[in-house]
Structures are given as structure tokens and as C-alpha cells.
Image (cartoon, rainbow, N blue to C red):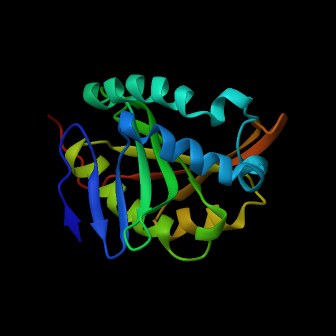
Amino acid sequence: MEDSSSAVGIHCRDGNVLIRTAKPSDAYTISNYFQENKTFLAPWEPKRDSAFYRADTWAAKLVKLEELHRLGLAYYCLIFDTDSKEMKGTVSLSNLVRFPLHSCNLGYSLAENAQGHGYMRKALAMVIPYMFNVQNIHRIAASYMPHNERSAAVLNAMGFQKEGYASDYLLINDQWEDHIQTALINPNWRAS
């Protein structure tokens, strides 16, 4: 596994899977990913307005995200297949809180044509050590809808433990959806 991550960004590769922090120049690539996967991702994500799918919207959003990356408050990452050069998914680390929580939330999406090929497991196997070892995060929280068996399997494979059940937790595709809440604890967390 190659890793050239820094305190301000993630850039790791494992075989043909590359994950890196998004840059403002990725606007077209990201908008294209979401356009191509609009129908497939709809049952798993908040309802999106038409502006969400435009490159200019992403260009503006990525400028703000780059500042959050620089400040260590969030990381929005892209997953690529290095053989095809195609974007296959996203990983977001949001609500980064330092003292006293030392925690963040994990979210992700994966292209329809990438399902079942191990992209997300490889991506998370690179992101989690970055958050634990470089960012010194103690706890990564993730939630999934009870019927999302693929997401449950990925989080279970990464070692996430079930912590609770949240009724009407997130507004997904215009419906309040229950979620199973999980977390992964950093066994090597260190006080600064």
C-alpha cells in the first residue's frame, strides 16, 4: 500500500484502488459521478435538487471543502480505480470534533458498477488508519438503514460495533429513515 497522506489530506493507494482528498479541480468528475449514479443512489441519500448535479455547484462546494480539509474539520475523499481512471465512490468524514470528543462521522457512496468489487473495504482500510494515526481521532461513528445489508457488511468487516437504533434518524429521499448506529474506537488513541 502506498501512502502519501499528510495532516491536510489523504492520498493512499492499495492495488488498483486510490483514495484521495477531493480538490476544486475535481468538480466535473464528481458531478459526472453523481449524474451517472443518480437513480442508483437515490434510495440511500437525501433528495438532491438539480443544482447538486452541476459542475459549477461542485466547484463552489469544493473551495469550501478545501478550507475544511486545511482546518482539519472535515475530509471529502474520492475513490478511483487506477486501471480505468474512473471515479468509483466517495468517503466523507464530517463533524470532526477534537477535545473532549475526538470523534467524527463517516459517510460513503459507491457507484452502481463498483458494487461487490471490494472498493469500499479497501478505501476504508486506508482512511481509518489516517483518521486514527494522523488525525488522532478516538471514535468514528457510522450509521446505516437496517435494510442496507451491503453497508452493514462493510462496517462489520471494518470492525464497527453496533451501538444503537435511531428511529426517524435521517431524511433520505424525502422519507425519515431509521438507522442502526455503529462506531469504531481507536485502540491506540493518545492524549496530546
Instruction: Answer left or right for 64 relative to 153.
Output: left
Q: Of 126 and 33, which appears nearest the observer?
A: 33
Instruction: Answer left or right for 84 relative to 102.
Output: right
Which part of the image, by quadrant, shows the N terminus? bottom left
Name the image quarter holding residue 99.
top left
Residue 134's place in the image compared with 14, above or below, is above
Which part of the image, by quadrant, shows the C terminus? top left
Specify whether residue 106 is in view. no
Q: Position of residue 91 (x, y in %)?
A: 47, 49
Q: Residue at x 43, y 30 (%)?
A: 62
Q: Of 159 and 29, which appears nearest the observer?
A: 29
Q: Position of residue 140 (x, y in %)?
A: 43, 46
Q: Position of residue 95 (x, y in %)?
A: 46, 30
Q: Residue at x 31, y 42 (%)?
A: 137
Q: Position of residue 2 (x, y in %)?
A: 20, 67
Q: Residue at x 67, y 53 (%)?
A: 36
Q: Which residue is drawn at 36% across and 57% down?
A: 19
Name the image quarter holding residue 166.
top right
